[in-house]
């Protein structure tokens, strides 16, 4: 009886609150006389447009600055190239499908130096224009697109390390240490996997869309990504050329980065071998004499570290001299040490 007596006021209060909320909701209901057909669609369209603009702005804000720069430069380059080649399309000979598509396709093939030969300049104007765009395109690929590719590969390195250590707990510090230790090796693995995927996709598309047999499709893929461009096999359909615009850019860039990372990996392995040899060999009296920078007959820890770094090829004597010169300029009282008083005097002078 006590529980029932205590619960009943609570139920009455809840019922009263629910009734009040219900009345409040009714106040905000649309009047039946409001003209829905005239106002609602306009308001809905404005809301949708504002939401789409906000969404696109948020997507651009989330992108890395290098990616945003690549997108802007690529749009400008391909836009100008497409417009220029579209106006001189009558002076370009070869198999044509669509004016705008052919111009964009020709711009990408020229930019990546693939040069199939299915579309070629046929006048002095178009030849000079192609020369301008091939050099500017190579500069764009080498300076801008490569930085974006590096950024994307480094982002995937973190995911790869987390996947390799799925069973154990890996913190941010461990991930950074693993990336710094095997950075170039992971880059090679990531780009190699992506390159294989692009080769497979290109072969399948050429087989399905361009109706090549498997050998010819693979042959065309290899001739394209290596920018060999024999020209006997190329994209000749509308769907194929639309696909090639994106695929040629990514595949040629990916192959270039792969060979660059392989070269970096070999250099890094050689550097590690030198470091291992320097640290494992026995230190002699001759080494101590060379490491004694101030000629006082005693080698301190700093002098020993500098000597070993010079042996490893990390620094050279010119670097050491430049650092010592800066130290002497900051050591105003010539005490052999730096203090806040030295920095204050050096900055005021």
Image (cartoon, rainbow, N blue to C red):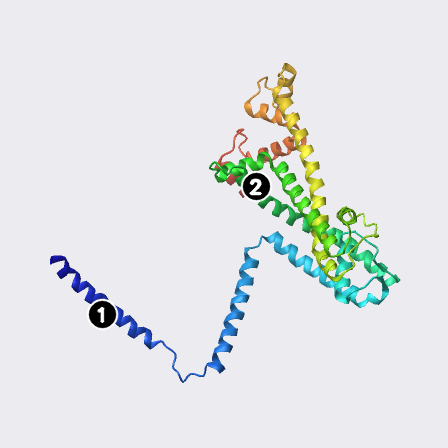
The residue shown at (71%, 63%) is 79
Q: Residue furthest bottom?
A: 33
Circle 1 sits on which residue?
16
Q: Is residue 346 above or below residue 116?
A: above
What residue is shown with label 2? 160
Q: Secondary structure at mark 2?
A: helix
Assess disc 2: are there few (<14), some (14-19) or many (≥20) residues with their C-alpha within 10 Å of its C-alpha.
Answer: some
Q: Is residue 186 left or right of residue 1?
A: right
Number of marks in picture = 2
**In whole angstroms, how far apart are the C-alphas of marks 1 and 2?**
58 Å
Who is closer to the viewer here, 221 or 61?
A: 221
In the image, residue 120 lies at what x, y percent?
85, 59
Along the viewing direction, whichever of 119 and 221 lies nearer the viewer: 221
Q: Decide which of tag 1 and tag 2 comes sooner along the chain.
A: 1
State whether residue 197 is above or below residue 17: above
Residue at image point 65% right, 26% down: 273
Indicate which disc residue 102 carries.
none
Left or right of 214: which side holds 282? left
Does the rendering let one see residue 275?
yes
Quadrant of residue 15 in the image? bottom left
The x and y percentages for residue 28 are: 35, 76
Report which quarter residue 80 is drawn in: bottom right
Check the image and report above or below for 254 versus 4. Answer: above
Mark nearer the viewer, 1 or 2? 1
Toward the viewer: 306 or 94?
94
- For the point 52% across and 70% down, the residue is 48
Query: Which residue lies most toward the top here?
Result: 285
Instruction: Pinpoint residue 98: horizontal percent, then vertical percent.
Output: 77, 66
């Amino acid at each position: 009886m006590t529980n029932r007596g205590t619960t009943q006021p609570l139920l009455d209060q809840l019922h009263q609150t629910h009734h009040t909320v219900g009345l409040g909701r009714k106040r905000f209901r649309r009047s039946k006389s409001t003209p829905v057909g005239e106002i609602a669609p306009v308001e809905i369209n404005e809301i949708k447009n504002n939401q789409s603009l906000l969404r696109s702005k948020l997507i651009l804000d989330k992108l890395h600055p290098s990616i945003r720069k690549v997108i802007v430069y690529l749009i400008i380059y391909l836009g100008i190239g497409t417009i220029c080649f579209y106006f001189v399309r009558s002076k370009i000979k070869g198999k044509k499908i669509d004016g705008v598509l052919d111009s964009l396709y020709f711009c990408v093939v020229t930019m990546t130096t693939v040069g199939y030969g299915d579309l070629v300049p046929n006048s002095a104007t178009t030849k000079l224009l192609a020369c301008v765009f091939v050099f500017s395109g190579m500069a764009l690929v080498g300076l801008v697109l490569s930085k974006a590719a590096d950024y994307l590969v480094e982002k995937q390195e973190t995911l790869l390390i987390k996947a390799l250590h799925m069973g154990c707990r890996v913190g941010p510090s461990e991930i950074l240490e693993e990336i710094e230790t095997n950075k170039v090796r992971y880059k090679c693995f990531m780009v190699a996997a992506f390159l294989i995927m692009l080769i497979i996709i290109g072969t399948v598309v050429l087989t399905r869309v361009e109706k090549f047999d498997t050998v010819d499709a693979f042959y065309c893929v290899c001739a394209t990504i290596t920018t060999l461009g024999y020209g006997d096999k190329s994209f000749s359909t509308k769907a194929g050329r639309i696909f090639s615009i994106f695929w040629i850019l990514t595949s040629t860039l990916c192959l270039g980065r792969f060979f660059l990372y392989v070269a970096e990996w070999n250099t890094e392995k050689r550097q590690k071998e030198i470091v291992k040899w320097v640290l494992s060999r026995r230190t002699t009296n001759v080494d101590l004499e060379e490491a004694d920078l101030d000629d006082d007959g005693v080698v301190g820890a700093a002098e020993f570290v500098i000597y070993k770094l010079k042996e490893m090829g990390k620094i050279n004597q010119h670097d050491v001299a430049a650092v010592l010169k800066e130290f002497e300029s900051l050591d105003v009282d010539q005490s052999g040490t730096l203090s806040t008083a030295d920095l204050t005097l050096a900055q005021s002078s």
